[in-house]
Image: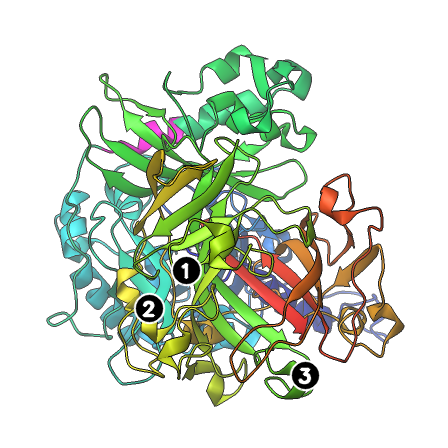
């Protein structure tokens, strides 16, 4: 699953079903008279639809909705609220009036998996059951059959789902032929050697068995990725096919319906040796560990360990926790295993957490034991989803054990996509000359934990890799003007200068994201038109803004917008970190870290779903409103968007400038003070949360005021409110609403 898949679709279909059911009415027994006897109604043998929902692992606990050709809910009252079993199986007993084609959608109420869709054309005969699996492959087949290549287009509304039922049998068969042509190599690997006998919709699946159709699902990913069709139009986020066991291969676009000759095939596996039933055992053992209450699974803890040495650790554990396969040398970003798991081991919300089979992200042959990256997802006892992304190594006995990433400092690089709404009336003019217009933007979040493992006396970190200037981006501690509870270093410069005072910037005004690209707007045609980055028209000002890429960084002409090749920013692109402690001029530590999902072009942001803030929150960004004054708290609220991922955390960023800067020279406004509360978690299901301003307790720079800076209309203050979405694949998706 990628950052850009839609997670919460089926509730729309369920809502549509409820509307139709409510409109059917019911009898009250008053017929207005009639005869004392009646002719018995003929007995109608029940008809049903049944199948397996799976993504390799069973799609357990999924909500299933079935719509017939009229758009009406197709399941009888007894099965109208369908939930898949632990094996992913569902059965829908059809109403007497239900007629095919049937559109079937399964969604995950815990947002760990993206929804899937299937179609069955024929109406089962009386007393018969039609088979209709719901998997990523059936989703791909429906997309090919209908030409609708995103989940929003496929199932983004009740109307869209009903439209699927207009698909003909011939179109679905043609789509299945195309899909099987693309899967030819993987069908052979799965032992499905006769493609004519394999049908993703009807071929039986035993989820978790690692055999036949289930093995095929283990080896295929159907995910949204940016696709440039060569037409000159901006890239779109569309469903594409990939094989995690062919890690060097790029995703393949879905073929055209009926085309079996010229479609691009999914590459055959280039590595072997993954036993998916064995990796599933890691999830099962974690579930056994977390089945016990905190007092039993974290029997004793050591809270005296400094954060710079990894922080608190569970020192004695339940026997079931000891059986989680972990290598003796496990280190993950500077944390020993039971430091890494400390927060979840001691969290009451994790008692009884349910773990799914780990998802394979990549396989890397290695000396001393092959490595795999696993996305281990869980649902806690409040229904909130979470995950660990961890490496595992193949042991001499053929089993797998968690080994961590072997890095001794907590750093990471994550792709970021942001929807940025600017609310000043005249951006980029007058006193607001430095405030950019509304836009979608994409970049790289370079995270260095300012107080975490390996941080003692850490002065500067220089990061290099594709998309960054060749000299490297330098990060440092936030400046003394910053009052913040943030845990990260800020960008100081992009010239590679590790002597921060010489560089002239102390990291006070830049965050940790290095921005690569932006669009001209967030709506209309300009939402997909790329705009030159700040100061791009003047090569002499390449270093004017430390956290934006510039044509001059890459030897491109002034005003260029296409100097970054996003195909080189795919998953597992690596970045080098150089660490400078105290007065070092040569790094004493050097390590590398990858991005685990691709960076998307900015124009692709327009094809994603976003959650809007409400009127009361907008008042916080209106200088004339009393809500925009200085305050110790700010309450953010938003309107749920069932097509978007849930909001996982929020942030508030307020600034006061000593001057407006100089537009003639490009000198930015000088930050006099900033009060930042970077990340307040949002409980599952909540649509409002209150953010507390940081104080001297969290940062000595805050003094005793503990107040967010009030907003004014003179250009000398700025306020940004941020919603971050719950992404479980190593990416960052956020919407920012700002004034100045």
Q: Which residues are magenta?
A: 274-281
Q: In the visual, does 535 lie left or right of 39?
A: left
- Measured from the top left, where is residue 386 in percent x and y? 55, 42
Measured Cα–Cα span from mark 2 to mark 3 = 28 Å
Are dots 1 and 3 in contact, CB under 8 Å? no
Front residue of this view, candidates 615 and 706: 706
Count neighbours of disc 3 (C-alpha within 10 A) and say few if under 14, some if 14 to 19, many if 20 or more: some
Residue furthest out toward the right? 626
Residue furthest out toward the front? 502
- Measured from the top left, where is residue 540 in percent x and y? 38, 77
Are dots 2 and 1 in contact, CB under 8 Å? yes
Q: In the visual, does 36 lie left or right of 115?
A: right
Q: Which residue does the image show at 52% across and 78% down from the upper left?
A: 666
Count neighbours of disc 2 (C-alpha within 10 A) and say few if under 14, some if 14 to 19, many if 20 or more: some
Are dots 2 and 3 in contact, CB under 8 Å? no
Q: Relative to 627, is 205 above or below?
A: above
Front residue of this view, candidates 202 and 493: 493
Query: What residue is disc 2 on?
Result: 553
* Earlier residue among tags 1 and 3: 3
Q: For numbered disc 2, what is the local secondary structure?
A: helix
Front residue of this view, candidates 584 and 137: 584
Query: What residue is disc 1 on?
Result: 494
Q: Relative to 342, is 72 above or below?
A: below
């Amino acid at each position: 699953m990628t950052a850009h898949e839609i997670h919460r679709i089926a509730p729309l279909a369920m809502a549509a079903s409820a509307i139709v059911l409510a409109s059917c009415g019911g009898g009250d027994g008053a017929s207005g008279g009639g005869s004392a006897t009646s002719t018995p109604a003929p007995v109608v043998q029940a008809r049903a639809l049944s199948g397996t929902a799976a993504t390799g692992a069973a799609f357990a606990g999924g909500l299933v909705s079935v719509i017939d050709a009229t758009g009406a809910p197709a399941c009888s009252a007894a099965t109208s609220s369908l939930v898949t079993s632990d094996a992913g199986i569902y059965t829908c007993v059809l109403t007497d009036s239900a007629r095919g084609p049937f559109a079937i959608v399964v969604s995950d109420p815990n947002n760990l998996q993206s929804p899937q869709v299937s179609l069955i054309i024929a109406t089962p005969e009386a007393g018969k059951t039609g088979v209709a699996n719901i998997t990523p492959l059936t989703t791909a087949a429906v997309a090919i059959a209908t030409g609708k290549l995103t989940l929003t287009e496929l199932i983004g509304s009740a109307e869209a789902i009903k439209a699927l039922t207009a698909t003909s049998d011939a179109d679905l068969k043609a789509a299945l032929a195309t899909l099987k042509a693309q899967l030819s190599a993987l069908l052979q690997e799965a032992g499905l050697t006769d493609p004519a006998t394999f049908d993703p919709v009807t071929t039986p699946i035993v989820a978790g068995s690692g055999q036949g159709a289930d093995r095929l699902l283990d080896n295929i990913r159907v995910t949204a990725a940016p696709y440039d069709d060569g037409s000159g139009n901006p890239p779109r986020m569309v469903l594409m096919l990939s094989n995690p066991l062919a890690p060097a291969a790029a995703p393949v676009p879905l073929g055209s319906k009926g085309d079996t000759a010229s479609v691009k095939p999914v590459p055959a596996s280039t590595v072997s040796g993954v036993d998916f039933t064995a990796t599933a055992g890691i999830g099962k053992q974690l579930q056994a560990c977390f089945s016990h209450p905190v007092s039993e699974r974290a029997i004793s803890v050591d809270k005296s360990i400094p954060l710079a040495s990894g922080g608190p650790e569970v020192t004695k554990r339940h026997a079931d926790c000891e059986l989680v396969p972990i290598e003796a040398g496990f280190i993950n970003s500077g944390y020993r295993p039971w430091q890494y798991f400390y927060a979840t081991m001691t969290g009451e919300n994790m008692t009884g957490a349910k773990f799914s089979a780990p998802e394979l992200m990549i396989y890397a042959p290695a000396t001393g034991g092959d490595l795999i990256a696993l996305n281990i997802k869980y649902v806690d006892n409040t229904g909130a989803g979470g995950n660990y992304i961890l490496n595992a190594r193949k042991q001499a006995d053929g089993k797998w054990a968690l080994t961590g990433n072997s890095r001794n400092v907590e750093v990471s690089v994550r792709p970021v996509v942001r929807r940025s709404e600017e609310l000043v009336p005249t951006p980029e003019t007058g006193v607001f000359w430095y405030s950019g217009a509304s836009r979608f933007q994409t970049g790289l979040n370079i995270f260095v934990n300012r107080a975490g493992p390996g941080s003692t006396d850490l002065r500067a970190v220089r990061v290099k890799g594709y998309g960054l200037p060749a000299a490297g981006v330098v990060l440092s501690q936030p400046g003394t003007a910053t009052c913040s509870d943030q845990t990260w270093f800020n960008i100081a410069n992009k010239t590679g200068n590790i002597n921060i005072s010489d560089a002239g910037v102390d990291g006070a005004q830049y965050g940790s994201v290095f921005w690569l690209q932006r669009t001209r707007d967030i709506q209309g045609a300009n939402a997909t038109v790329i705009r030159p980055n700040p100061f791009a028209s003047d090569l002499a000002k390449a270093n004017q803004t430390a956290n934006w890429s510039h044509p001059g960084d890459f030897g491109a002409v002034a005003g260029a917008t296409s100097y970054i090749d996003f195909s080189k920013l795919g998953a597992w692109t690596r970045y080098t970190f150089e660490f400078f402690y105290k007065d070092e001029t040569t790094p004493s530590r050097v390590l590398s870290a990858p991005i685990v999902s691709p960076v998307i072009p900015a124009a692709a942001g327009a094809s994603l779903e976003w959650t809007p803030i409400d009127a009361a929150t907008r008042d916080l960004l209106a200088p004339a409103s009393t809500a925009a004054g200085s305050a110790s708290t700010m309450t953010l609220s938003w309107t749920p968007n069932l097509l978007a991922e849930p909001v996982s955390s929020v942030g508030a960023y307020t600034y006061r400038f000593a001057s407006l800067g100089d537009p003639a020279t490009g000198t930015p406004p000088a930050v006099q003070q900033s009060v930042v509360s970077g990340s307040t978690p949002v409980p599952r299901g909540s649509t409002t949360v209150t953010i507390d301003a940081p104080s001297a307790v969290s940062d000595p720079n805050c003094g005793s005021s503990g107040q967010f800076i009030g907003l004014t209309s003179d250009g000398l203050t700025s306020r940004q409110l941020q919603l971050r979405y719950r992404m479980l694949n190593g990416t960052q998706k956020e919407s920012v609403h700002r004034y100045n």
